[in-house]
Every structure is written in structure tokens, then in C-alpha cells.
Image (spheres, grey):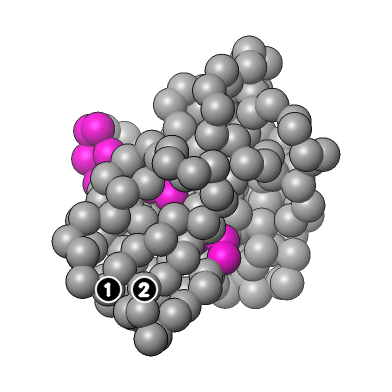
Amino acid sequence: MPLRPHGTYCHYWDGDVKVWGYTAAVVDMDIDNEDLQQCADAVMRLRGEYLFSSKQYDKMHFNFTNGFCCDFVTWAEGSRVGISGNKTWWRNGAAQKDYSYRNFRKWMKMVFYYAGTLSLSRELKPVKIEDVQIGDVLIRGGSPGHAEIIVDVYKNEAKREVKLMLAQSYMPAQETEILYTSSNKSPYHTISYDQDIIYTTSWDFGIDEIKRFVE
């Protein structure tokens, strides 16, 4: 996805500027006019946008916190989600068949309401640091929890390290930003294969908190 011009400020959902010095770039992607697209939501949004743009509709699914799998194909075919307490089900035939981008965004908004770091961390599978790739996620589920998505990777097998470019949203909901490191204002976080903690600008993750979407 495109980035906004260099030097663009990151904004919160209500239009206020995020005042801090670690925004390397801002993804040129609108966010809903609500406090919805937070950290895990931004990760799911980027994956959803990629799969929708490449028409990989069958891979578009996310779990709610209660474990319900909300997939785009069922939604696009006209079903809608019924919710009563902790019970969730599909209401078949509630809408017309619609694979438009507008309907995709409605589906994503439903996901934002009922999924988060806890559900996403359970849905993803663990990945070793030496096997990390673009699209993997640093994630800790819970309250508080956090998620950052890997958008670029450099590997140096001789030094047993990787350099990761990371993107995130946060709380309250904000535009998706590429992070500078807190030490030398580089957009690449250097991670050794042998360290136990991954230190990023916004959060510290365990080396076992690198995860990947299951196809």
C-alpha cells in the first residue's frame, strides 16, 4: 500500500495529531471515524486489504474473542452475524450477495468490534525468529496487549540476526505508522537469534511471540 508524503504526522481517529518522534512513515489508508482500528485491527486490516485486492476471498477470515470464525465469503454471499450474549451464529440470507469494497469494509468493521489481540494471538501459529518473514506478527494477547506487523525483513545469517521494519496502530485508534527505533531513528529493529526479548519502540515482546497467519 502507498505511504503518505515523508514527514506526514500520524493522526488519531478523531483527527488529533499523535505527538511523538518515532513515526518513520504513515500508511495512506483511511480509518473509520470511530475508536476502532487499534493495534490488532490494523494488522487484520492490512491482511484483509491485501487478500481482497488479490481476490483471495477464501483466505479472508478472523476469529472473534469467543472463537467464532467470521469469514468474508459467508458475509459476501449474504449472511450476517447474529449475536446474543456470548452466542454467535450466521443469519443466512439476511442480505444480498455483494463482493464490493464497500461491503468488505463493513465486514472488517464487524471484525474490529469482536476481535482483538487475545483472539488474534490464539488464531496465529508460532514462528522461530530465524524463519521470520514479511506479514508475520509480533503479538501479545490480553488487556493490555499489543500487536505489530512485520512489513520488511533483512536477514544476516553470518551475524545470526534480522532487521525488522514494523508497522502498528495503537490505543486510541490511529493511522497505521511505520516505526523508527528509539535508539538511532532507523526504521529497522535489529533482533539477534539468541536474545529472549524483542525490544521495539512501543512494546517488548518475548522471542516466542512471533506468529503467522494460518492459510
Residue at image location 64% in from the left, 28% down from the top = 10
Q: Is residue 68 magenta?
A: no
Report if the CB atoms under discs 1 and 2 are less than 8 Å apart. Answer: yes
Mark 1, Cα crowd under 10 Å, few <14 / some 14-19 / many 20+, is some
Query: Dividing the picture into quarters, in which one does residue 33 lie?
Result: top right
Mark 2, Cα crowd under 10 Å, few <14 / some 14-19 / many 20+, is some
Quadrant holding the C terminus: bottom left
- Where residue 86 sits: x, y (%)? 24, 39
Earlier-in-chain disc, 1 versus 2: 2
Using the image as rendered, state which of residue 133 and residue 122 is in the foreground: 133
Using the image as rendered, state which of residue 137 and residue 106 is in the foreground: 137
- Give the residue type at disc 2: Glu
Give the alpha-carbon distance from disc 1 to disc 2, as whole Å.
5 Å
Query: Dividing the picture into quarters, in which one does residue 156 lie?
Result: bottom left
| 87 shown above or below 100 | above
Residue at image location 76% in from the left, 47% down from the top = 3
Quadrant holding the N terminus: bottom right
Q: For this view, does 121 lie left or right of residue 154? A: left
Residue at image location 67% in from the left, 42% down from the top = 25
Q: For this view, does 136 lie left or right of residue 122? A: right
Magenta segment boundaries in residue numbering: 141-152
Query: Dividing the picture into quarters, in which one does residue 76 lie?
Result: bottom right
| 83 shown above or below 21 | below
Instruction: Label 2, secondary structure: give it.
Output: strand
Residue, disc 2: 161
- Where residue 165 sits: x, y (%)? 53, 57
Residue, disc 1: 193
Using the image as rendered, state which of residue 159 and residue 120 is in the foreground: 159
| 100 shown above or below 195 | above
